[in-house]
Image: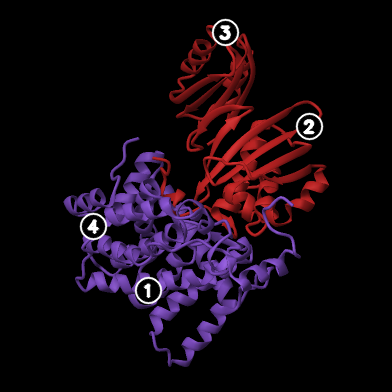
Amino acid sequence: MKFKSVFDIIGPVMIGPSSSHTAGAARIGRVARDLFGRQPKWAKIHLYGSFAETYKGHSTDVAIIGGLLDYDTFDERIKTSFEEAEKVGLDFEFIPETGHVDHPNTARIVLGDERSDMSLMGISIGGGKIEITELNGFPLRLSGNHPAILVVHDDRSGCIANVANCLYKYDINIGHMEVSRKEKGRMALMVIEVDQNVDKEVMDELSELPNITQVTRIAD
Amino acid sequence: MEVLFRNVRELVERAEKEEKLISEIMIEQEIMITNRSREEVMQQMDRNLTVMEEAVEKGLRGVHSISGLTGGDAVLLQAYIEKGNSLSGQLLLDAVSKAVATNEVNAAMGTICATPTAGSAGVVPGTLFAVKNQLNPSREQMIRFLFTSGAFGFVVANNASISGAAGGCQAEVGSAAAMAAAAIVEMAGGTAQQSSEAFAITMKNMLGLVCDPVAGLVEVPCVKRNAMGAANAVVAADMALAGVTSRIPCDEVIGAMFEIGQTMPTALKETAKGGLAATPTGKWLEKKIFGGAVVGSGQ
């Protein structure tokens, strides 16, 4: 079941005009910002399907930039996000694409700063609900309904066990977990949805584990 | 995930067996799934209700969108109702005007509560605040109206779609109207079964409705489709309360809506390429608003 809460249906409270193309778009932008962990300096946003056809009318562009500036769906500043982006030095570009995608409301956000870059693909599935389908080329599924941790690591034996052990130590229960890699022995990714919020202490311990490159938390 | 109901049949059966309101089943499921207290869940819905009230009030004072395509119709309707000569009746037109008010605020990038989406946000509050004047519900009953709507919306979202891009307007305003009809029945004292009949009757009359927004804006025809969604909901609720039933069961109507959405051409699913968006006037408006640029072609 993709829609779990009644507030997925009666909600979110948001700035108009579209739950999928405005609120959902803002949420995709905000997740990208969360995963990047800091204010990006530049962003290229590729829009597909209905997003590409109607983004101006639905203020999808304004909303995604709002999300990249860490605004929630009901934040009035979404309306002036382009001006706000200029103030904080965020350069951005929107690229409507004609290629086929699985879901009609798809956005690919590539962003970065002088230190690193990141790419993310998100879909807006209706009523403001979103799914992140890809991170740095890795396919993934994040419902957004539970706290989640993303762990980028080297593809070595023991990595997964170490992470699971660490979570067990803090009595954190894993609800859903996916592991993927691009190539044997190279970079891999763990996506872990948990039942409890993960505090900084746990995050620090996870990032100290051998062969772990990056640990990011998405709070509920 | 354990849930108390996956479709309307299970929802109605549980309500009948446990002798509970549909809203109560929805509240219990929410508490179970999110692990929150009843108080927290009720408070969150109370806040959503307040957002809806404020949006209606704002719309009735008069708003206009940036494009200039929509705004001011809620004010016209209220002035007309006050003259007392309306043909369709005070309650029905009041629901229509309040649905329009909400969507005019939405089109003007105001704050609204999606029910189930922003483009269809007018129907549920529009009917709620109109029916309120006749039934004089308590605050809790008004909050319950939203949980009942939500219970039916939950079934539609998980078994079909509430996205115009995926299923057309029938998935948005169609779902909203059917959700509202079911909630009106509960507030008026009807049974759980009657709520499901009202839902089915409404949805049947929304099947096939396409999503063809002019210039890709959530304005034309969205605002007026919310108006008619509200009218449809009130009439269907009355029909169900009178004892009229749907020959096709509720869940099968939802299934039909999903199938129709799947086979609907992409041009009619929120791409602004077909239907009213592709009419000469629709295209002219698009050009006027976006300064001649062809939206979405990448040129």
How far apart marks 1 and 4 lie (CA) works out to 26 Å
**Lower position in the chain sequence, tag 2 or tag 3:** 2
Q: Secondary structure at mark 4?
A: loop
Instruction: Determine whether, in the image, residue B62 is placed left or right of residue A118.
Output: left
Which residue position holds label 4? B249
Number of residues whose C-alpha sits closer than 10 Å to that of mark 1, classed few (under 14), some (14–19) or many (20 or more)? many
**Label 1 SS:** helix
Image coordinates for residue A170, horizontal then vertical, percent: 49, 19
Rounded to the nearest whole Å, what is the CA distance between mark 3 and mark 1? 63 Å
Residues marked 1 and 2, same chain: no
Q: Nearer the viewer, mark 4 or mark 3?
A: 4
> x, y (%) of residue B235?
33, 74
Task: Please name the amino acid that badge 2 sits on.
Answer: Asp
The picture places residue A107, in percent across and down from the top left corner, at 62, 42
Q: Which residue is mark 2?
A: A113
Disc 4 versus disc 2: nearer the observer: 4
